[in-house]
Image (cartoon, helix red, strand yellow):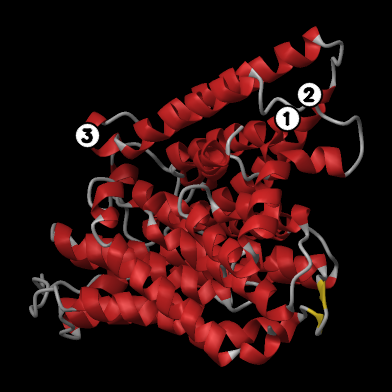
């Protein structure tokens, strides 16, 4: 395959599906020159075009990628079966399915808590408080942005974005321009805030837990905080420009004071405790964060049981209860209200790109990027790739290649993989989740219009890191 062709397929090929081969088992077949490889790339490209066109076709984004995933893996399995290797593809797809299961269950718990807080009027009460405080659209833009940047290092960028988006939707109402701009700001701020903390993004967790060795020593916990100022620049540059386009007016105040329902504050506390549990499970006992999140879901389940058993302690009946539903709080209603289109979209992407990685493009990408381009150019390109393919598979691919780089280069790729996904709405878990949460208001093409401004912040953050942390290179 020519270098030009390699460049064309590169954005669609970086995923840890080849980790199966690296970790043991039979060597997978090289299908990069096979018709199956070309067909798989074409199928995935068409499916992603349909995802981008969701705003116009009104076809849910999960549908094309789920279909593409099934076809790609079926083609791979047929080729392997024809060559007498019956179980290789099965083992590889199981590995990809495990990666998806951890992501999906993590998201499901976060979405369930968000729905529970929404049902308890947490965000309506916050909206009412913000409106009564007299904050204008510009002030609200900065408040939600600052909160997103400061919360995401402690929690994670996805959960933070979901929280702040719920506030924006409650405050912004029908003002689509404000909701769109504020959601873009939240995605950029949450991704930037998560890039300088080991707990802020899955990619930073991967680099930290990998215990990467460099000529300057190990990339340890405290090394990531050298990225604080570059991350801050990454958010502030586009935020300052976007804020100028917002009207200097205030949301319409209804005059009504919204009160949170019984148990709301305790659910907020349980959510923070769940985040703490996930961090503690991962940091201290080396368990996957999703185990901590699912443990936290049990907190909410038991508290929901308590709310049902102690119902009507001074709590007015809701419309549902007045019209025949006696259940005060049902945890499974909150699970059912999760954004399933988003969760299934991740399934399709994980398996599609995992199949392309298993076909054999990862070795090609490693040779092209870190040998031909050089480390700095390659790490900058990683950030651009993460805008097309989620940063998790991109970082997995880099850690699998394990190029010999300095501390500064490893921090550079951590920064670019973390913030590069902000360039497109589909480039990060936060952006994809907000497209589902603010459907019709925060869209792919709405985000795309601000891509040049976000790219300006991306370049400024890289320049800041290269200048500020020059001694690490």
Residue 2: percent from the left, percent from the top? Answer: 58, 36
Query: Is 87 left, or right, of 386 in this rendering?
Result: right
The label on residue 93 is 1
Query: Is 187 left, or right, of 84 in this rendering?
Result: left
Residue 35: percent from the left, percent from the top? Answer: 61, 17
- What whole-number distance in Å separates the C-alpha atoms at marks 2 and 1? 5 Å
Is 421 situated above or below 279? above
The label on residue 409 is none
The label on residue 90 is 2
Residue 60: percent from the left, percent from the top? Answer: 36, 32
Q: Residues within 10 Å of mark 1 (few under 14, many from 20)?
A: many
Which of the two residues, 116 or 263, is positioned nearer the viewer here?
116
Pointer 2 and pointer 1: residues touching (CB < 8 Å)?
Answer: yes
Disc 3 target residue: 56
- What whole-number distance in Å separates the C-alpha atoms at marks 1 and 3? 32 Å
Residue 92: percent from the left, percent from the top? Answer: 77, 31
Query: Is 352 left, or right, of 20 in this rendering?
Result: left
Q: Quadrant of the N terminus?
A: top right
Is 374 situated above or below 269? above
- Residue positioned 60% across, 22% down in the render: 72
- Residue 239 placement: quadrant: bottom left
Image mark count: 3
Which of the two residues, 147 or 370, is positioned nearer the viewer here?
370
- Residue 143 placement: quadrant: bottom left
Tag 2 secondary structure: helix
Q: Quadrant of the C terminus?
A: bottom right
Q: Residues within 10 Å of mark 3 (few under 14, many from 20)?
A: few
Q: Can residue 141 be seen in this snapshot?
A: yes
Extreme top residue here?
82
């Amino acid at each position: 395959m020519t270098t030009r062709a390699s460049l064309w397929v590169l954005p669609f090929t970086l995923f840890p599906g080849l980790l199966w081969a690296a970790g043991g088992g039979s060597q997978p077949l090289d299908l990069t020159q096979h018709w199956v490889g070309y067909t798989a790339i074409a199928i995935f490209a068409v499916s992603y075009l349909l995802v981008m066109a969701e705003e116009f076709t009104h076809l849910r984004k999960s549908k094309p990628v789920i279909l593409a995933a099934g076809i790609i893996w079926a083609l791979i399995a047929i080729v392997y079966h024809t060559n007498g290797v019956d179980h290789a593809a099965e083992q590889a797809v199981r590995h990809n399915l495990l990666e998806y299961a951890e992501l999906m269950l993590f998201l499901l718990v976060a979405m369930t808590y968000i729905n529970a807080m929404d049902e308890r009027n947490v965000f309506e009460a916050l909206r009412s408080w913000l409106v009564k405080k007299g904050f204008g659209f510009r002030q609200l833009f900065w408040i939600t942005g600052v909160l997103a940047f400061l919360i995401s290092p402690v929690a994670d960028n996805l959960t933070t974005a979901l929280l702040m988006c719920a506030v924006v939707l409650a405050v912004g109402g029908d003002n689509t321009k404000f909701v769109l701009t504020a959601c873009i700001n939240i995605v950029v701020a949450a991704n930037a805030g998560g890039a300088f903390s080991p707990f802020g993004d899955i990619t930073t967790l991967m680099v930290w837990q990998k215990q990467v060795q460099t000529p300057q020593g190990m990339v340890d916990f405290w090394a990531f905080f050298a990225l604080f100022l570059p991350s801050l620049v990454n958010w502030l540059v586009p935020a300052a420009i976007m804020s100028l386009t917002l009207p200097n007016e205030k949301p319409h105040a209804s005059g009504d004071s919204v009160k949170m329902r019984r148990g709301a504050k305790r659910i907020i506390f349980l959510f923070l405790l769940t985040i703490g549990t996930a961090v503690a499970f991962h940091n201290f006992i080396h368990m996957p964060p999703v185990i901590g999140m699912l443990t936290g879901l049990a907190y909410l389940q038991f508290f929901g049981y308590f709310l049902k058993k102690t119902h009507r302690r001074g709590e007015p009946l809701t419309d549902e209860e007045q019209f025949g539903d006696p259940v005060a709080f049902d945890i499974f209603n909150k699970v059912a209200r999760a954004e399933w289109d988003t969760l299934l979209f991740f399934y399709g992407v994980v398996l599609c790109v995992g199949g392309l990685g298993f076909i054999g493009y990862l070795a090609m990408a490693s040779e092209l990027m870190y040998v031909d381009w050089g480390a700095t150019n390659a790490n900058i390109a990683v950030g651009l790739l993460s805008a097309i393919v989620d940063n998790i598979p991109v970082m997995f691919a880099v850690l699998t290649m394990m190029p010999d780089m300095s501390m500064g280069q490893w921090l550079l790729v951590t920064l670019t993989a973390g913030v590069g996904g902000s360039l497109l709405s589909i480039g990060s878990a936060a952006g994809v989740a907000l497209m589902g949460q603010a459907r019709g208001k925060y869209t792919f093409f709405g985000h795309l219009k601000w891509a040049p401004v976000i790219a300006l912040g991306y370049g400024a953050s890289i320049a800041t890191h290269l200048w500020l942390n020059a001694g690490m290179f």
